[in-house]
Amino acid sequence: MRAQDEADIVACIPSLRRYARGLTADRERADDLVQDTLERAWGRFSLWQRRGEVRAWMFGIMHNLFIDRVRSQRSRSEQDAGDELPETPDRATQSDRLEVRDLDRVLQRLPPEQREVLLLVGVEEMSYQEVARVVGVPLGTVMSRLSRARERLRAEMEGREVISKMQRVK
């Protein structure tokens, strides 16, 4: 591996940590996810086709690892994800901190496929095409997931209930 390749991988670490925290909402699980991503990237670097930037490739690895973990957790237990969410805090004088906590709580309520697209576009500033490659779905699917995620996020932050198309038809 060239020194520049190593530097490119190391340069991705802050973004990977930020994305992992957004996906997992838990510092330890996020650190584990980043560590596993880095191990896999270093171990399989020779398989990288150099069709695009290493950053998108690394996010793709993290995406796949995260999805594998979500699937294995579902098969091991049938706990409701809502049970893991902390109670709603009382408003205090530190409103900014509470608003960020509320935003994080709402983000964790989004389906994983919507949350990951929202984080990659909104936080990591990836293009829709890059996100499509990372997540492994068509561009239209990225746009659809992003639109649904934004609407649900907006509604929940405003205290509204999101009404799906299926509920409107009934």
Image (cartoon, rainbow, N blue to C red):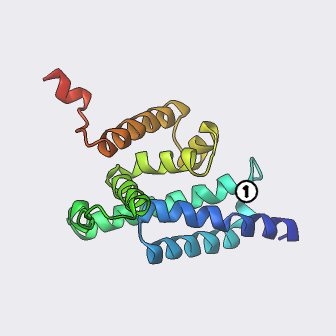
Residue 6 relative to residue 37: left or right: right
Q: Quadrant of the N terminus?
A: bottom right
Across and down, in percent, residue 44 comes to 68, 68
> With respect to residue 157, does 93 lie above or below?
below
Q: Where residue 156 sits: x, y (%)? A: 30, 44
Q: Is residue 2 visible?
A: no
Whether residue 129 is situated above or below residue 105 in the rendered picture: above
Name the residue nearer the viewer: 41 or 93: 93
Left or right of 163, for residue 68: right
Based on the displayed image, in which of its 4 quarters is residue 154 positioned? top left
Which residue has dot 1 on it? Answer: 54
Residue at 74%, 51% in the rendered image? 53
- The kind of residue on which mark 1 rests is Val
Image x and y of residue 108, in percent = 36, 57
Considering depth in this image, is 26 or 46 the residue closer to the camera? 26
| Res. 73 visible in picture | yes
Q: Position of residue 129 (x, y in %)?
A: 63, 37
Identify which residue is drawn at 48% across, 45% down: 118
Q: Which residue is found at the position 52% from the left and 57% from the top?
A: 63
